[in-house]
Image: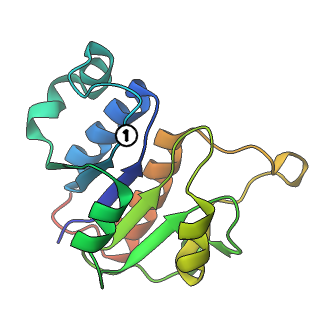
Amino acid sequence: MPLNVVLVEPEIPQNTGNIARTCVLTGSRLHLVKPLGFSIDEKDVRRAGLDYWPLLDLTVYENLQEFLEKHKGKKFYLATTRANKYYHEVKYEDEAFLIFGKETTGLPQWLIDEYYEDCIRIPMHEKILWRSLNLSNSVAIIVYEALKQLGFPNMR
């Protein structure tokens, strides 16, 4: 069963294009939560996603409330530098939703507070913890860890 990658208010089209490509190649679904910092018709998004874009399983939501209402009761993992658990310390489930925030500010604090037990982080050098990895790199790291734990379903 596929994973679900959720981008909350992404701002950089090239990141979203790269993430779309990762989703296609891993059989994951991509969920985009508006407002977006670009149009998904922009050439930068399509260029980064190359010819994978037509193969993408994509859902777009008007806002975070719409997304949360539609997927109430599903398993969420929220990627944030403000988490205490590392991404490899949790047991991922089929159909899990891996939720990532916008490039400049991450996820809203109220969402982190509400789902704090499901927040995960990627370890980084202790001298620069106030920074974070590129969004598309973070998505790839966590998606592949989840897929590894699930036995790389439908992949070879």
Residue at position x 22%, y 23% in the image: 50
Number of numbered discs visible in the structure rendering: 1
Q: Is residue 34 left or right of residue 53?
A: right
Q: Position of residue 140 (x, y in %)?
A: 44, 49
Quarter the C terminus occupies: bottom left
Residue at position x 46%, y 32% in the image: 11
Which secondary structure lies at badge 1? loop
Q: From the viewer's perspective, is residue 12 above or below residue 104?
A: above
Q: Position of residue 14 (x, y in %)?
A: 40, 25
Give residue 68's quadrant in the image: bottom left
Q: Position of residue 67 (x, y in %)?
A: 29, 63
Question: Disc 1 marks which amino acid?
Answer: Pro
Q: Residue furthest right?
A: 127
Give residue 84's quadrant in the image: bottom right
Q: Position of residue 102 (x, y in %)?
A: 51, 43
Q: Residue furthest left?
A: 54
Q: Is residue 87 left or right of residue 4?
A: right
Q: Is residue 114 left or right of residue 49?
A: right
Q: Of 147 and 103, which appears nearest the observer?
A: 103
The structure's colour scheme is rainbow
Q: From the viewer's perspective, is residue 122 above or below residue 76?
A: above
Give residue 74's quadrant in the image: bottom left
Characterize the local packing of mark 1: few (<14), some (14-19) or many (20 or more) Cα atoms within 10 angstroms: some
Residue at position x 90%, y 48% in the image: 127
Quarter the N terminus occupies: bottom left
Residue at position x 34%, y 68% in the image: 97
Q: Which residue is mark 1?
A: 35
